[in-house]
Image (cartoon, coloured by chain):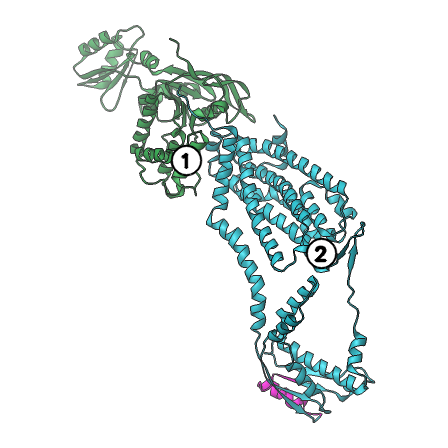
Amino acid sequence: MPDRPQQSYLGKIWLVAWREFRHTALTKGFIFGAVAMPVVMFAVIAVLPNLLSKQQPPLRGAIAVVDPTGTVVPRAKAILERRPTVAELAGELASNPPETTAERVDAMSQLSSASDQVVEVEWRLETAPDAVASIKSSLAKGELIAGASIDPGALDPAKTAEGVEIFIPSSLSPKHIGQISRALRKAVEQERIARSGVDPGLLTRLADTPEPKTTRISPKGAEAKENTELRFAVPAAFMFLLWICVFTSANYLLTTTIEEKSNKVMEVLLAAASPMQLLAGKILGYSMVSLVILVMYGGLGVAGLSAAAMMDLVDPMHLVYLVIFFAMAYFMVASMMAAVGSAVSDLREAQSLVAPVTFVLIVPLMLWMVIIENPNGLFATIVSFVPPITPFVMILRLTATTEQIPAWQTVLSIAWGFACAVGMLWVASRIFRVGVLMQGKPPTPRELLRWALVR
Amino acid sequence: MPVSSAVRIENVVKRFGSVQAVKGISLEIPERSLCGFLGPNGAGKSTTIRMIMSIIAPDSGRVEVMGATALAMKDRIGYLPEERGVYRKMKVGEFVGYMARLKGVHPAGLSRRIDDWLERLALPGVAKRRCEELSKGQQQKIQLLASIIHAPDLLILDEPFSGLDPINGRLVTELIRAEQARGATIIFSTHQMHTAEALCDKVVLINKGEKVLDATMRELRAKHDDRGLVCEPRESPRAFADAAVARGLAVRARPHENGTVDLDLADGTDAGDAMEAALALAPMRSVALRRMNLDDVFVELVGAADGTTAKGARIDA
């Protein structure tokens, strides 16, 4: 026999892994779907609200108001026309820059709601108490954009503010209705305050409720500024990132395995590599795909936070946990998908087997709020040790708060999680070995179990 | 000098549920031979081949490939499964290259080697095309190429001719001969008896999970050649047939519509003497020794197992 080079055991695994990676991650579809898409979406989310807020339709036309005292209309006119523009807000921000994260978020929301909307409203003051009928007919003819009637009783500080009516044509947009309504309400309020003789400044100060500055004190005495919105956003972002990375690639693993079976290419592969080599190669290949997605999305998140100078929200240790629990989650989900993919002949058959798995894995998606609220609670602690969702729950708990998760729980969940992942890989390999050669009717879960347990 | 075996299987049994697909088959395939696996559909050929390949494990019995298991010898075996499959989106060159690399072929010079082979298979310039762009027959040739690109010592081809037109069929026949000439042992299964007859050194006939024939072509010819004559009398074939049986020249005589008569000679009759006797019996256009026909052997053995008289079935066919 001629001396021939043979491919080593690991060499075959690597060849399979590289093929899977190359034909998944280095394709136009993937680059567009997994790489370009988030970038585009990010850009759209960041830019679109600004574009929209700047393109508000102008408010033009006449508003007739039955205002027997003649005091409400001038006030309403002033309120409607005096709205801060983007330029004004920007100027204000420049002279008084925000210092805390909360202030920055606040300034951004103000900026996005500000606008350079054109307001050209002609206010018509009607003093005759019976002018309402003529206003209504003018509205019907389209001569007015709105009408209103103010009962003088509504301006009496001794009474409740009742007797203000607004009439609008059917074509007026909700945005414009809101603007006009707000101007009139504010005008009546101002007039009532003026009539009562109370200093409006005093009233504002009196009505001012305190905005408490919340500081979280850890058991070790460390202080951290509390930010409620971001306290929810950061753990959720970590968990969703994990979820998206793992599921995208595990789904690829499922569909390509089914494709190889239905294409009948599986037997050709089995003549060249053992089922274990194939499975290991596939899982390795898609772990690389998954890592690319993780680095892409995670990197985008980190870049975004750095750009907004908010990296203080992310503890570097969180990134370490992300990598650990990513590996755990990936091996758990990938082994299930590989087992199912090997056992069925088409995607539709796979759905029914994958459904229960997906159902369990949706739990962290539905209950993340509950878990973040009380990361050391009984529910959160228990679900941390339920195998397929362990990594998702743990990443939520670990990033949820400055409150410490007991160290033993972190260590135990990692050890237990990886032990389960290894167990699931073993079961998957048993099923894969039998499943890849099976054709025809899809197996029942019971048959799958038998495949896993027989010699 | 004893010839060593490329494949040796002993008393191999395989069941699928309640169906016993292979019932204790034993056989040996000598190195460098070209062996045909024949048998009707569902006889157990593919199951036997898959067990040789270690793709499925036998329930009992032993399979040895080049002195070891097929798993250990994977890189020295080329395999074309019965169910054809390629990666549809992969380019032809990439697909063949991938299979070659899995089989241990060094990447240096591989694409050149693939191009040469594609040329040889009358598929020049398809390396850059996706597999799905090729016709079914072309895909089949690509898959055949993927099974021989690493110059295997043992080549197992499950129905290599099915779905091929005569031109491509001839091309594959030549390729198989060339692989044998290179030194490979070849096992192929087929329904096409004339191809097996033309190509094989040895045939194994499997029916209902059992081996019903295992012989070299030489043995088969020795057994079946010279056991009959094909005569073409100038006058009535039926009268000649009756006379041949009446005179004890043949134990059976079957006239055909084309004017020829098949004579089955009695055991121990010398074929030369019988030819002379036939010429003396009636004026003849031609008298020839009847050559062994694998089709007949197949129908006889498989038909016998089915309880039908194969020969009777053939007479009026």
Q: Is residue B222 left or right of residue A91?
A: left
Which residue bears the numbered disc 2?
A: A231
Q: Specify few, some or many for label 2: CA neighbours under 10 Å numbering under 14, 14-19, or 20 or more.
A: some
Q: Which residue is painted at 37% across and 8% down in the image? A: B1
Q: CA distance from mark 2 to mark 1?
A: 52 Å
* Residue A248 image offset from top left, x and y in percent: 57, 47
| Chain drawn cyan in the picture | A
Of the pair A171 and A372, the residue shown nearer to us: A372
In which image quadrant can residue B131 be found? Answer: top left
From which residue to which does the magenta span run? A129-147
Near-viewer residue (A455 or A53) = A53
Quadrant where the image shows the C terminus of chain B: top left
Which circle marks residue B97 in the picture? 1
Secondary structure at badge 2 equals helix
Q: Position of residue B240 (x, y in %)?
A: 22, 15
Q: Residue at x 32, y 11 (%)?
A: B222
Q: On what subunit does the disc labeled 2 rest?
A: A
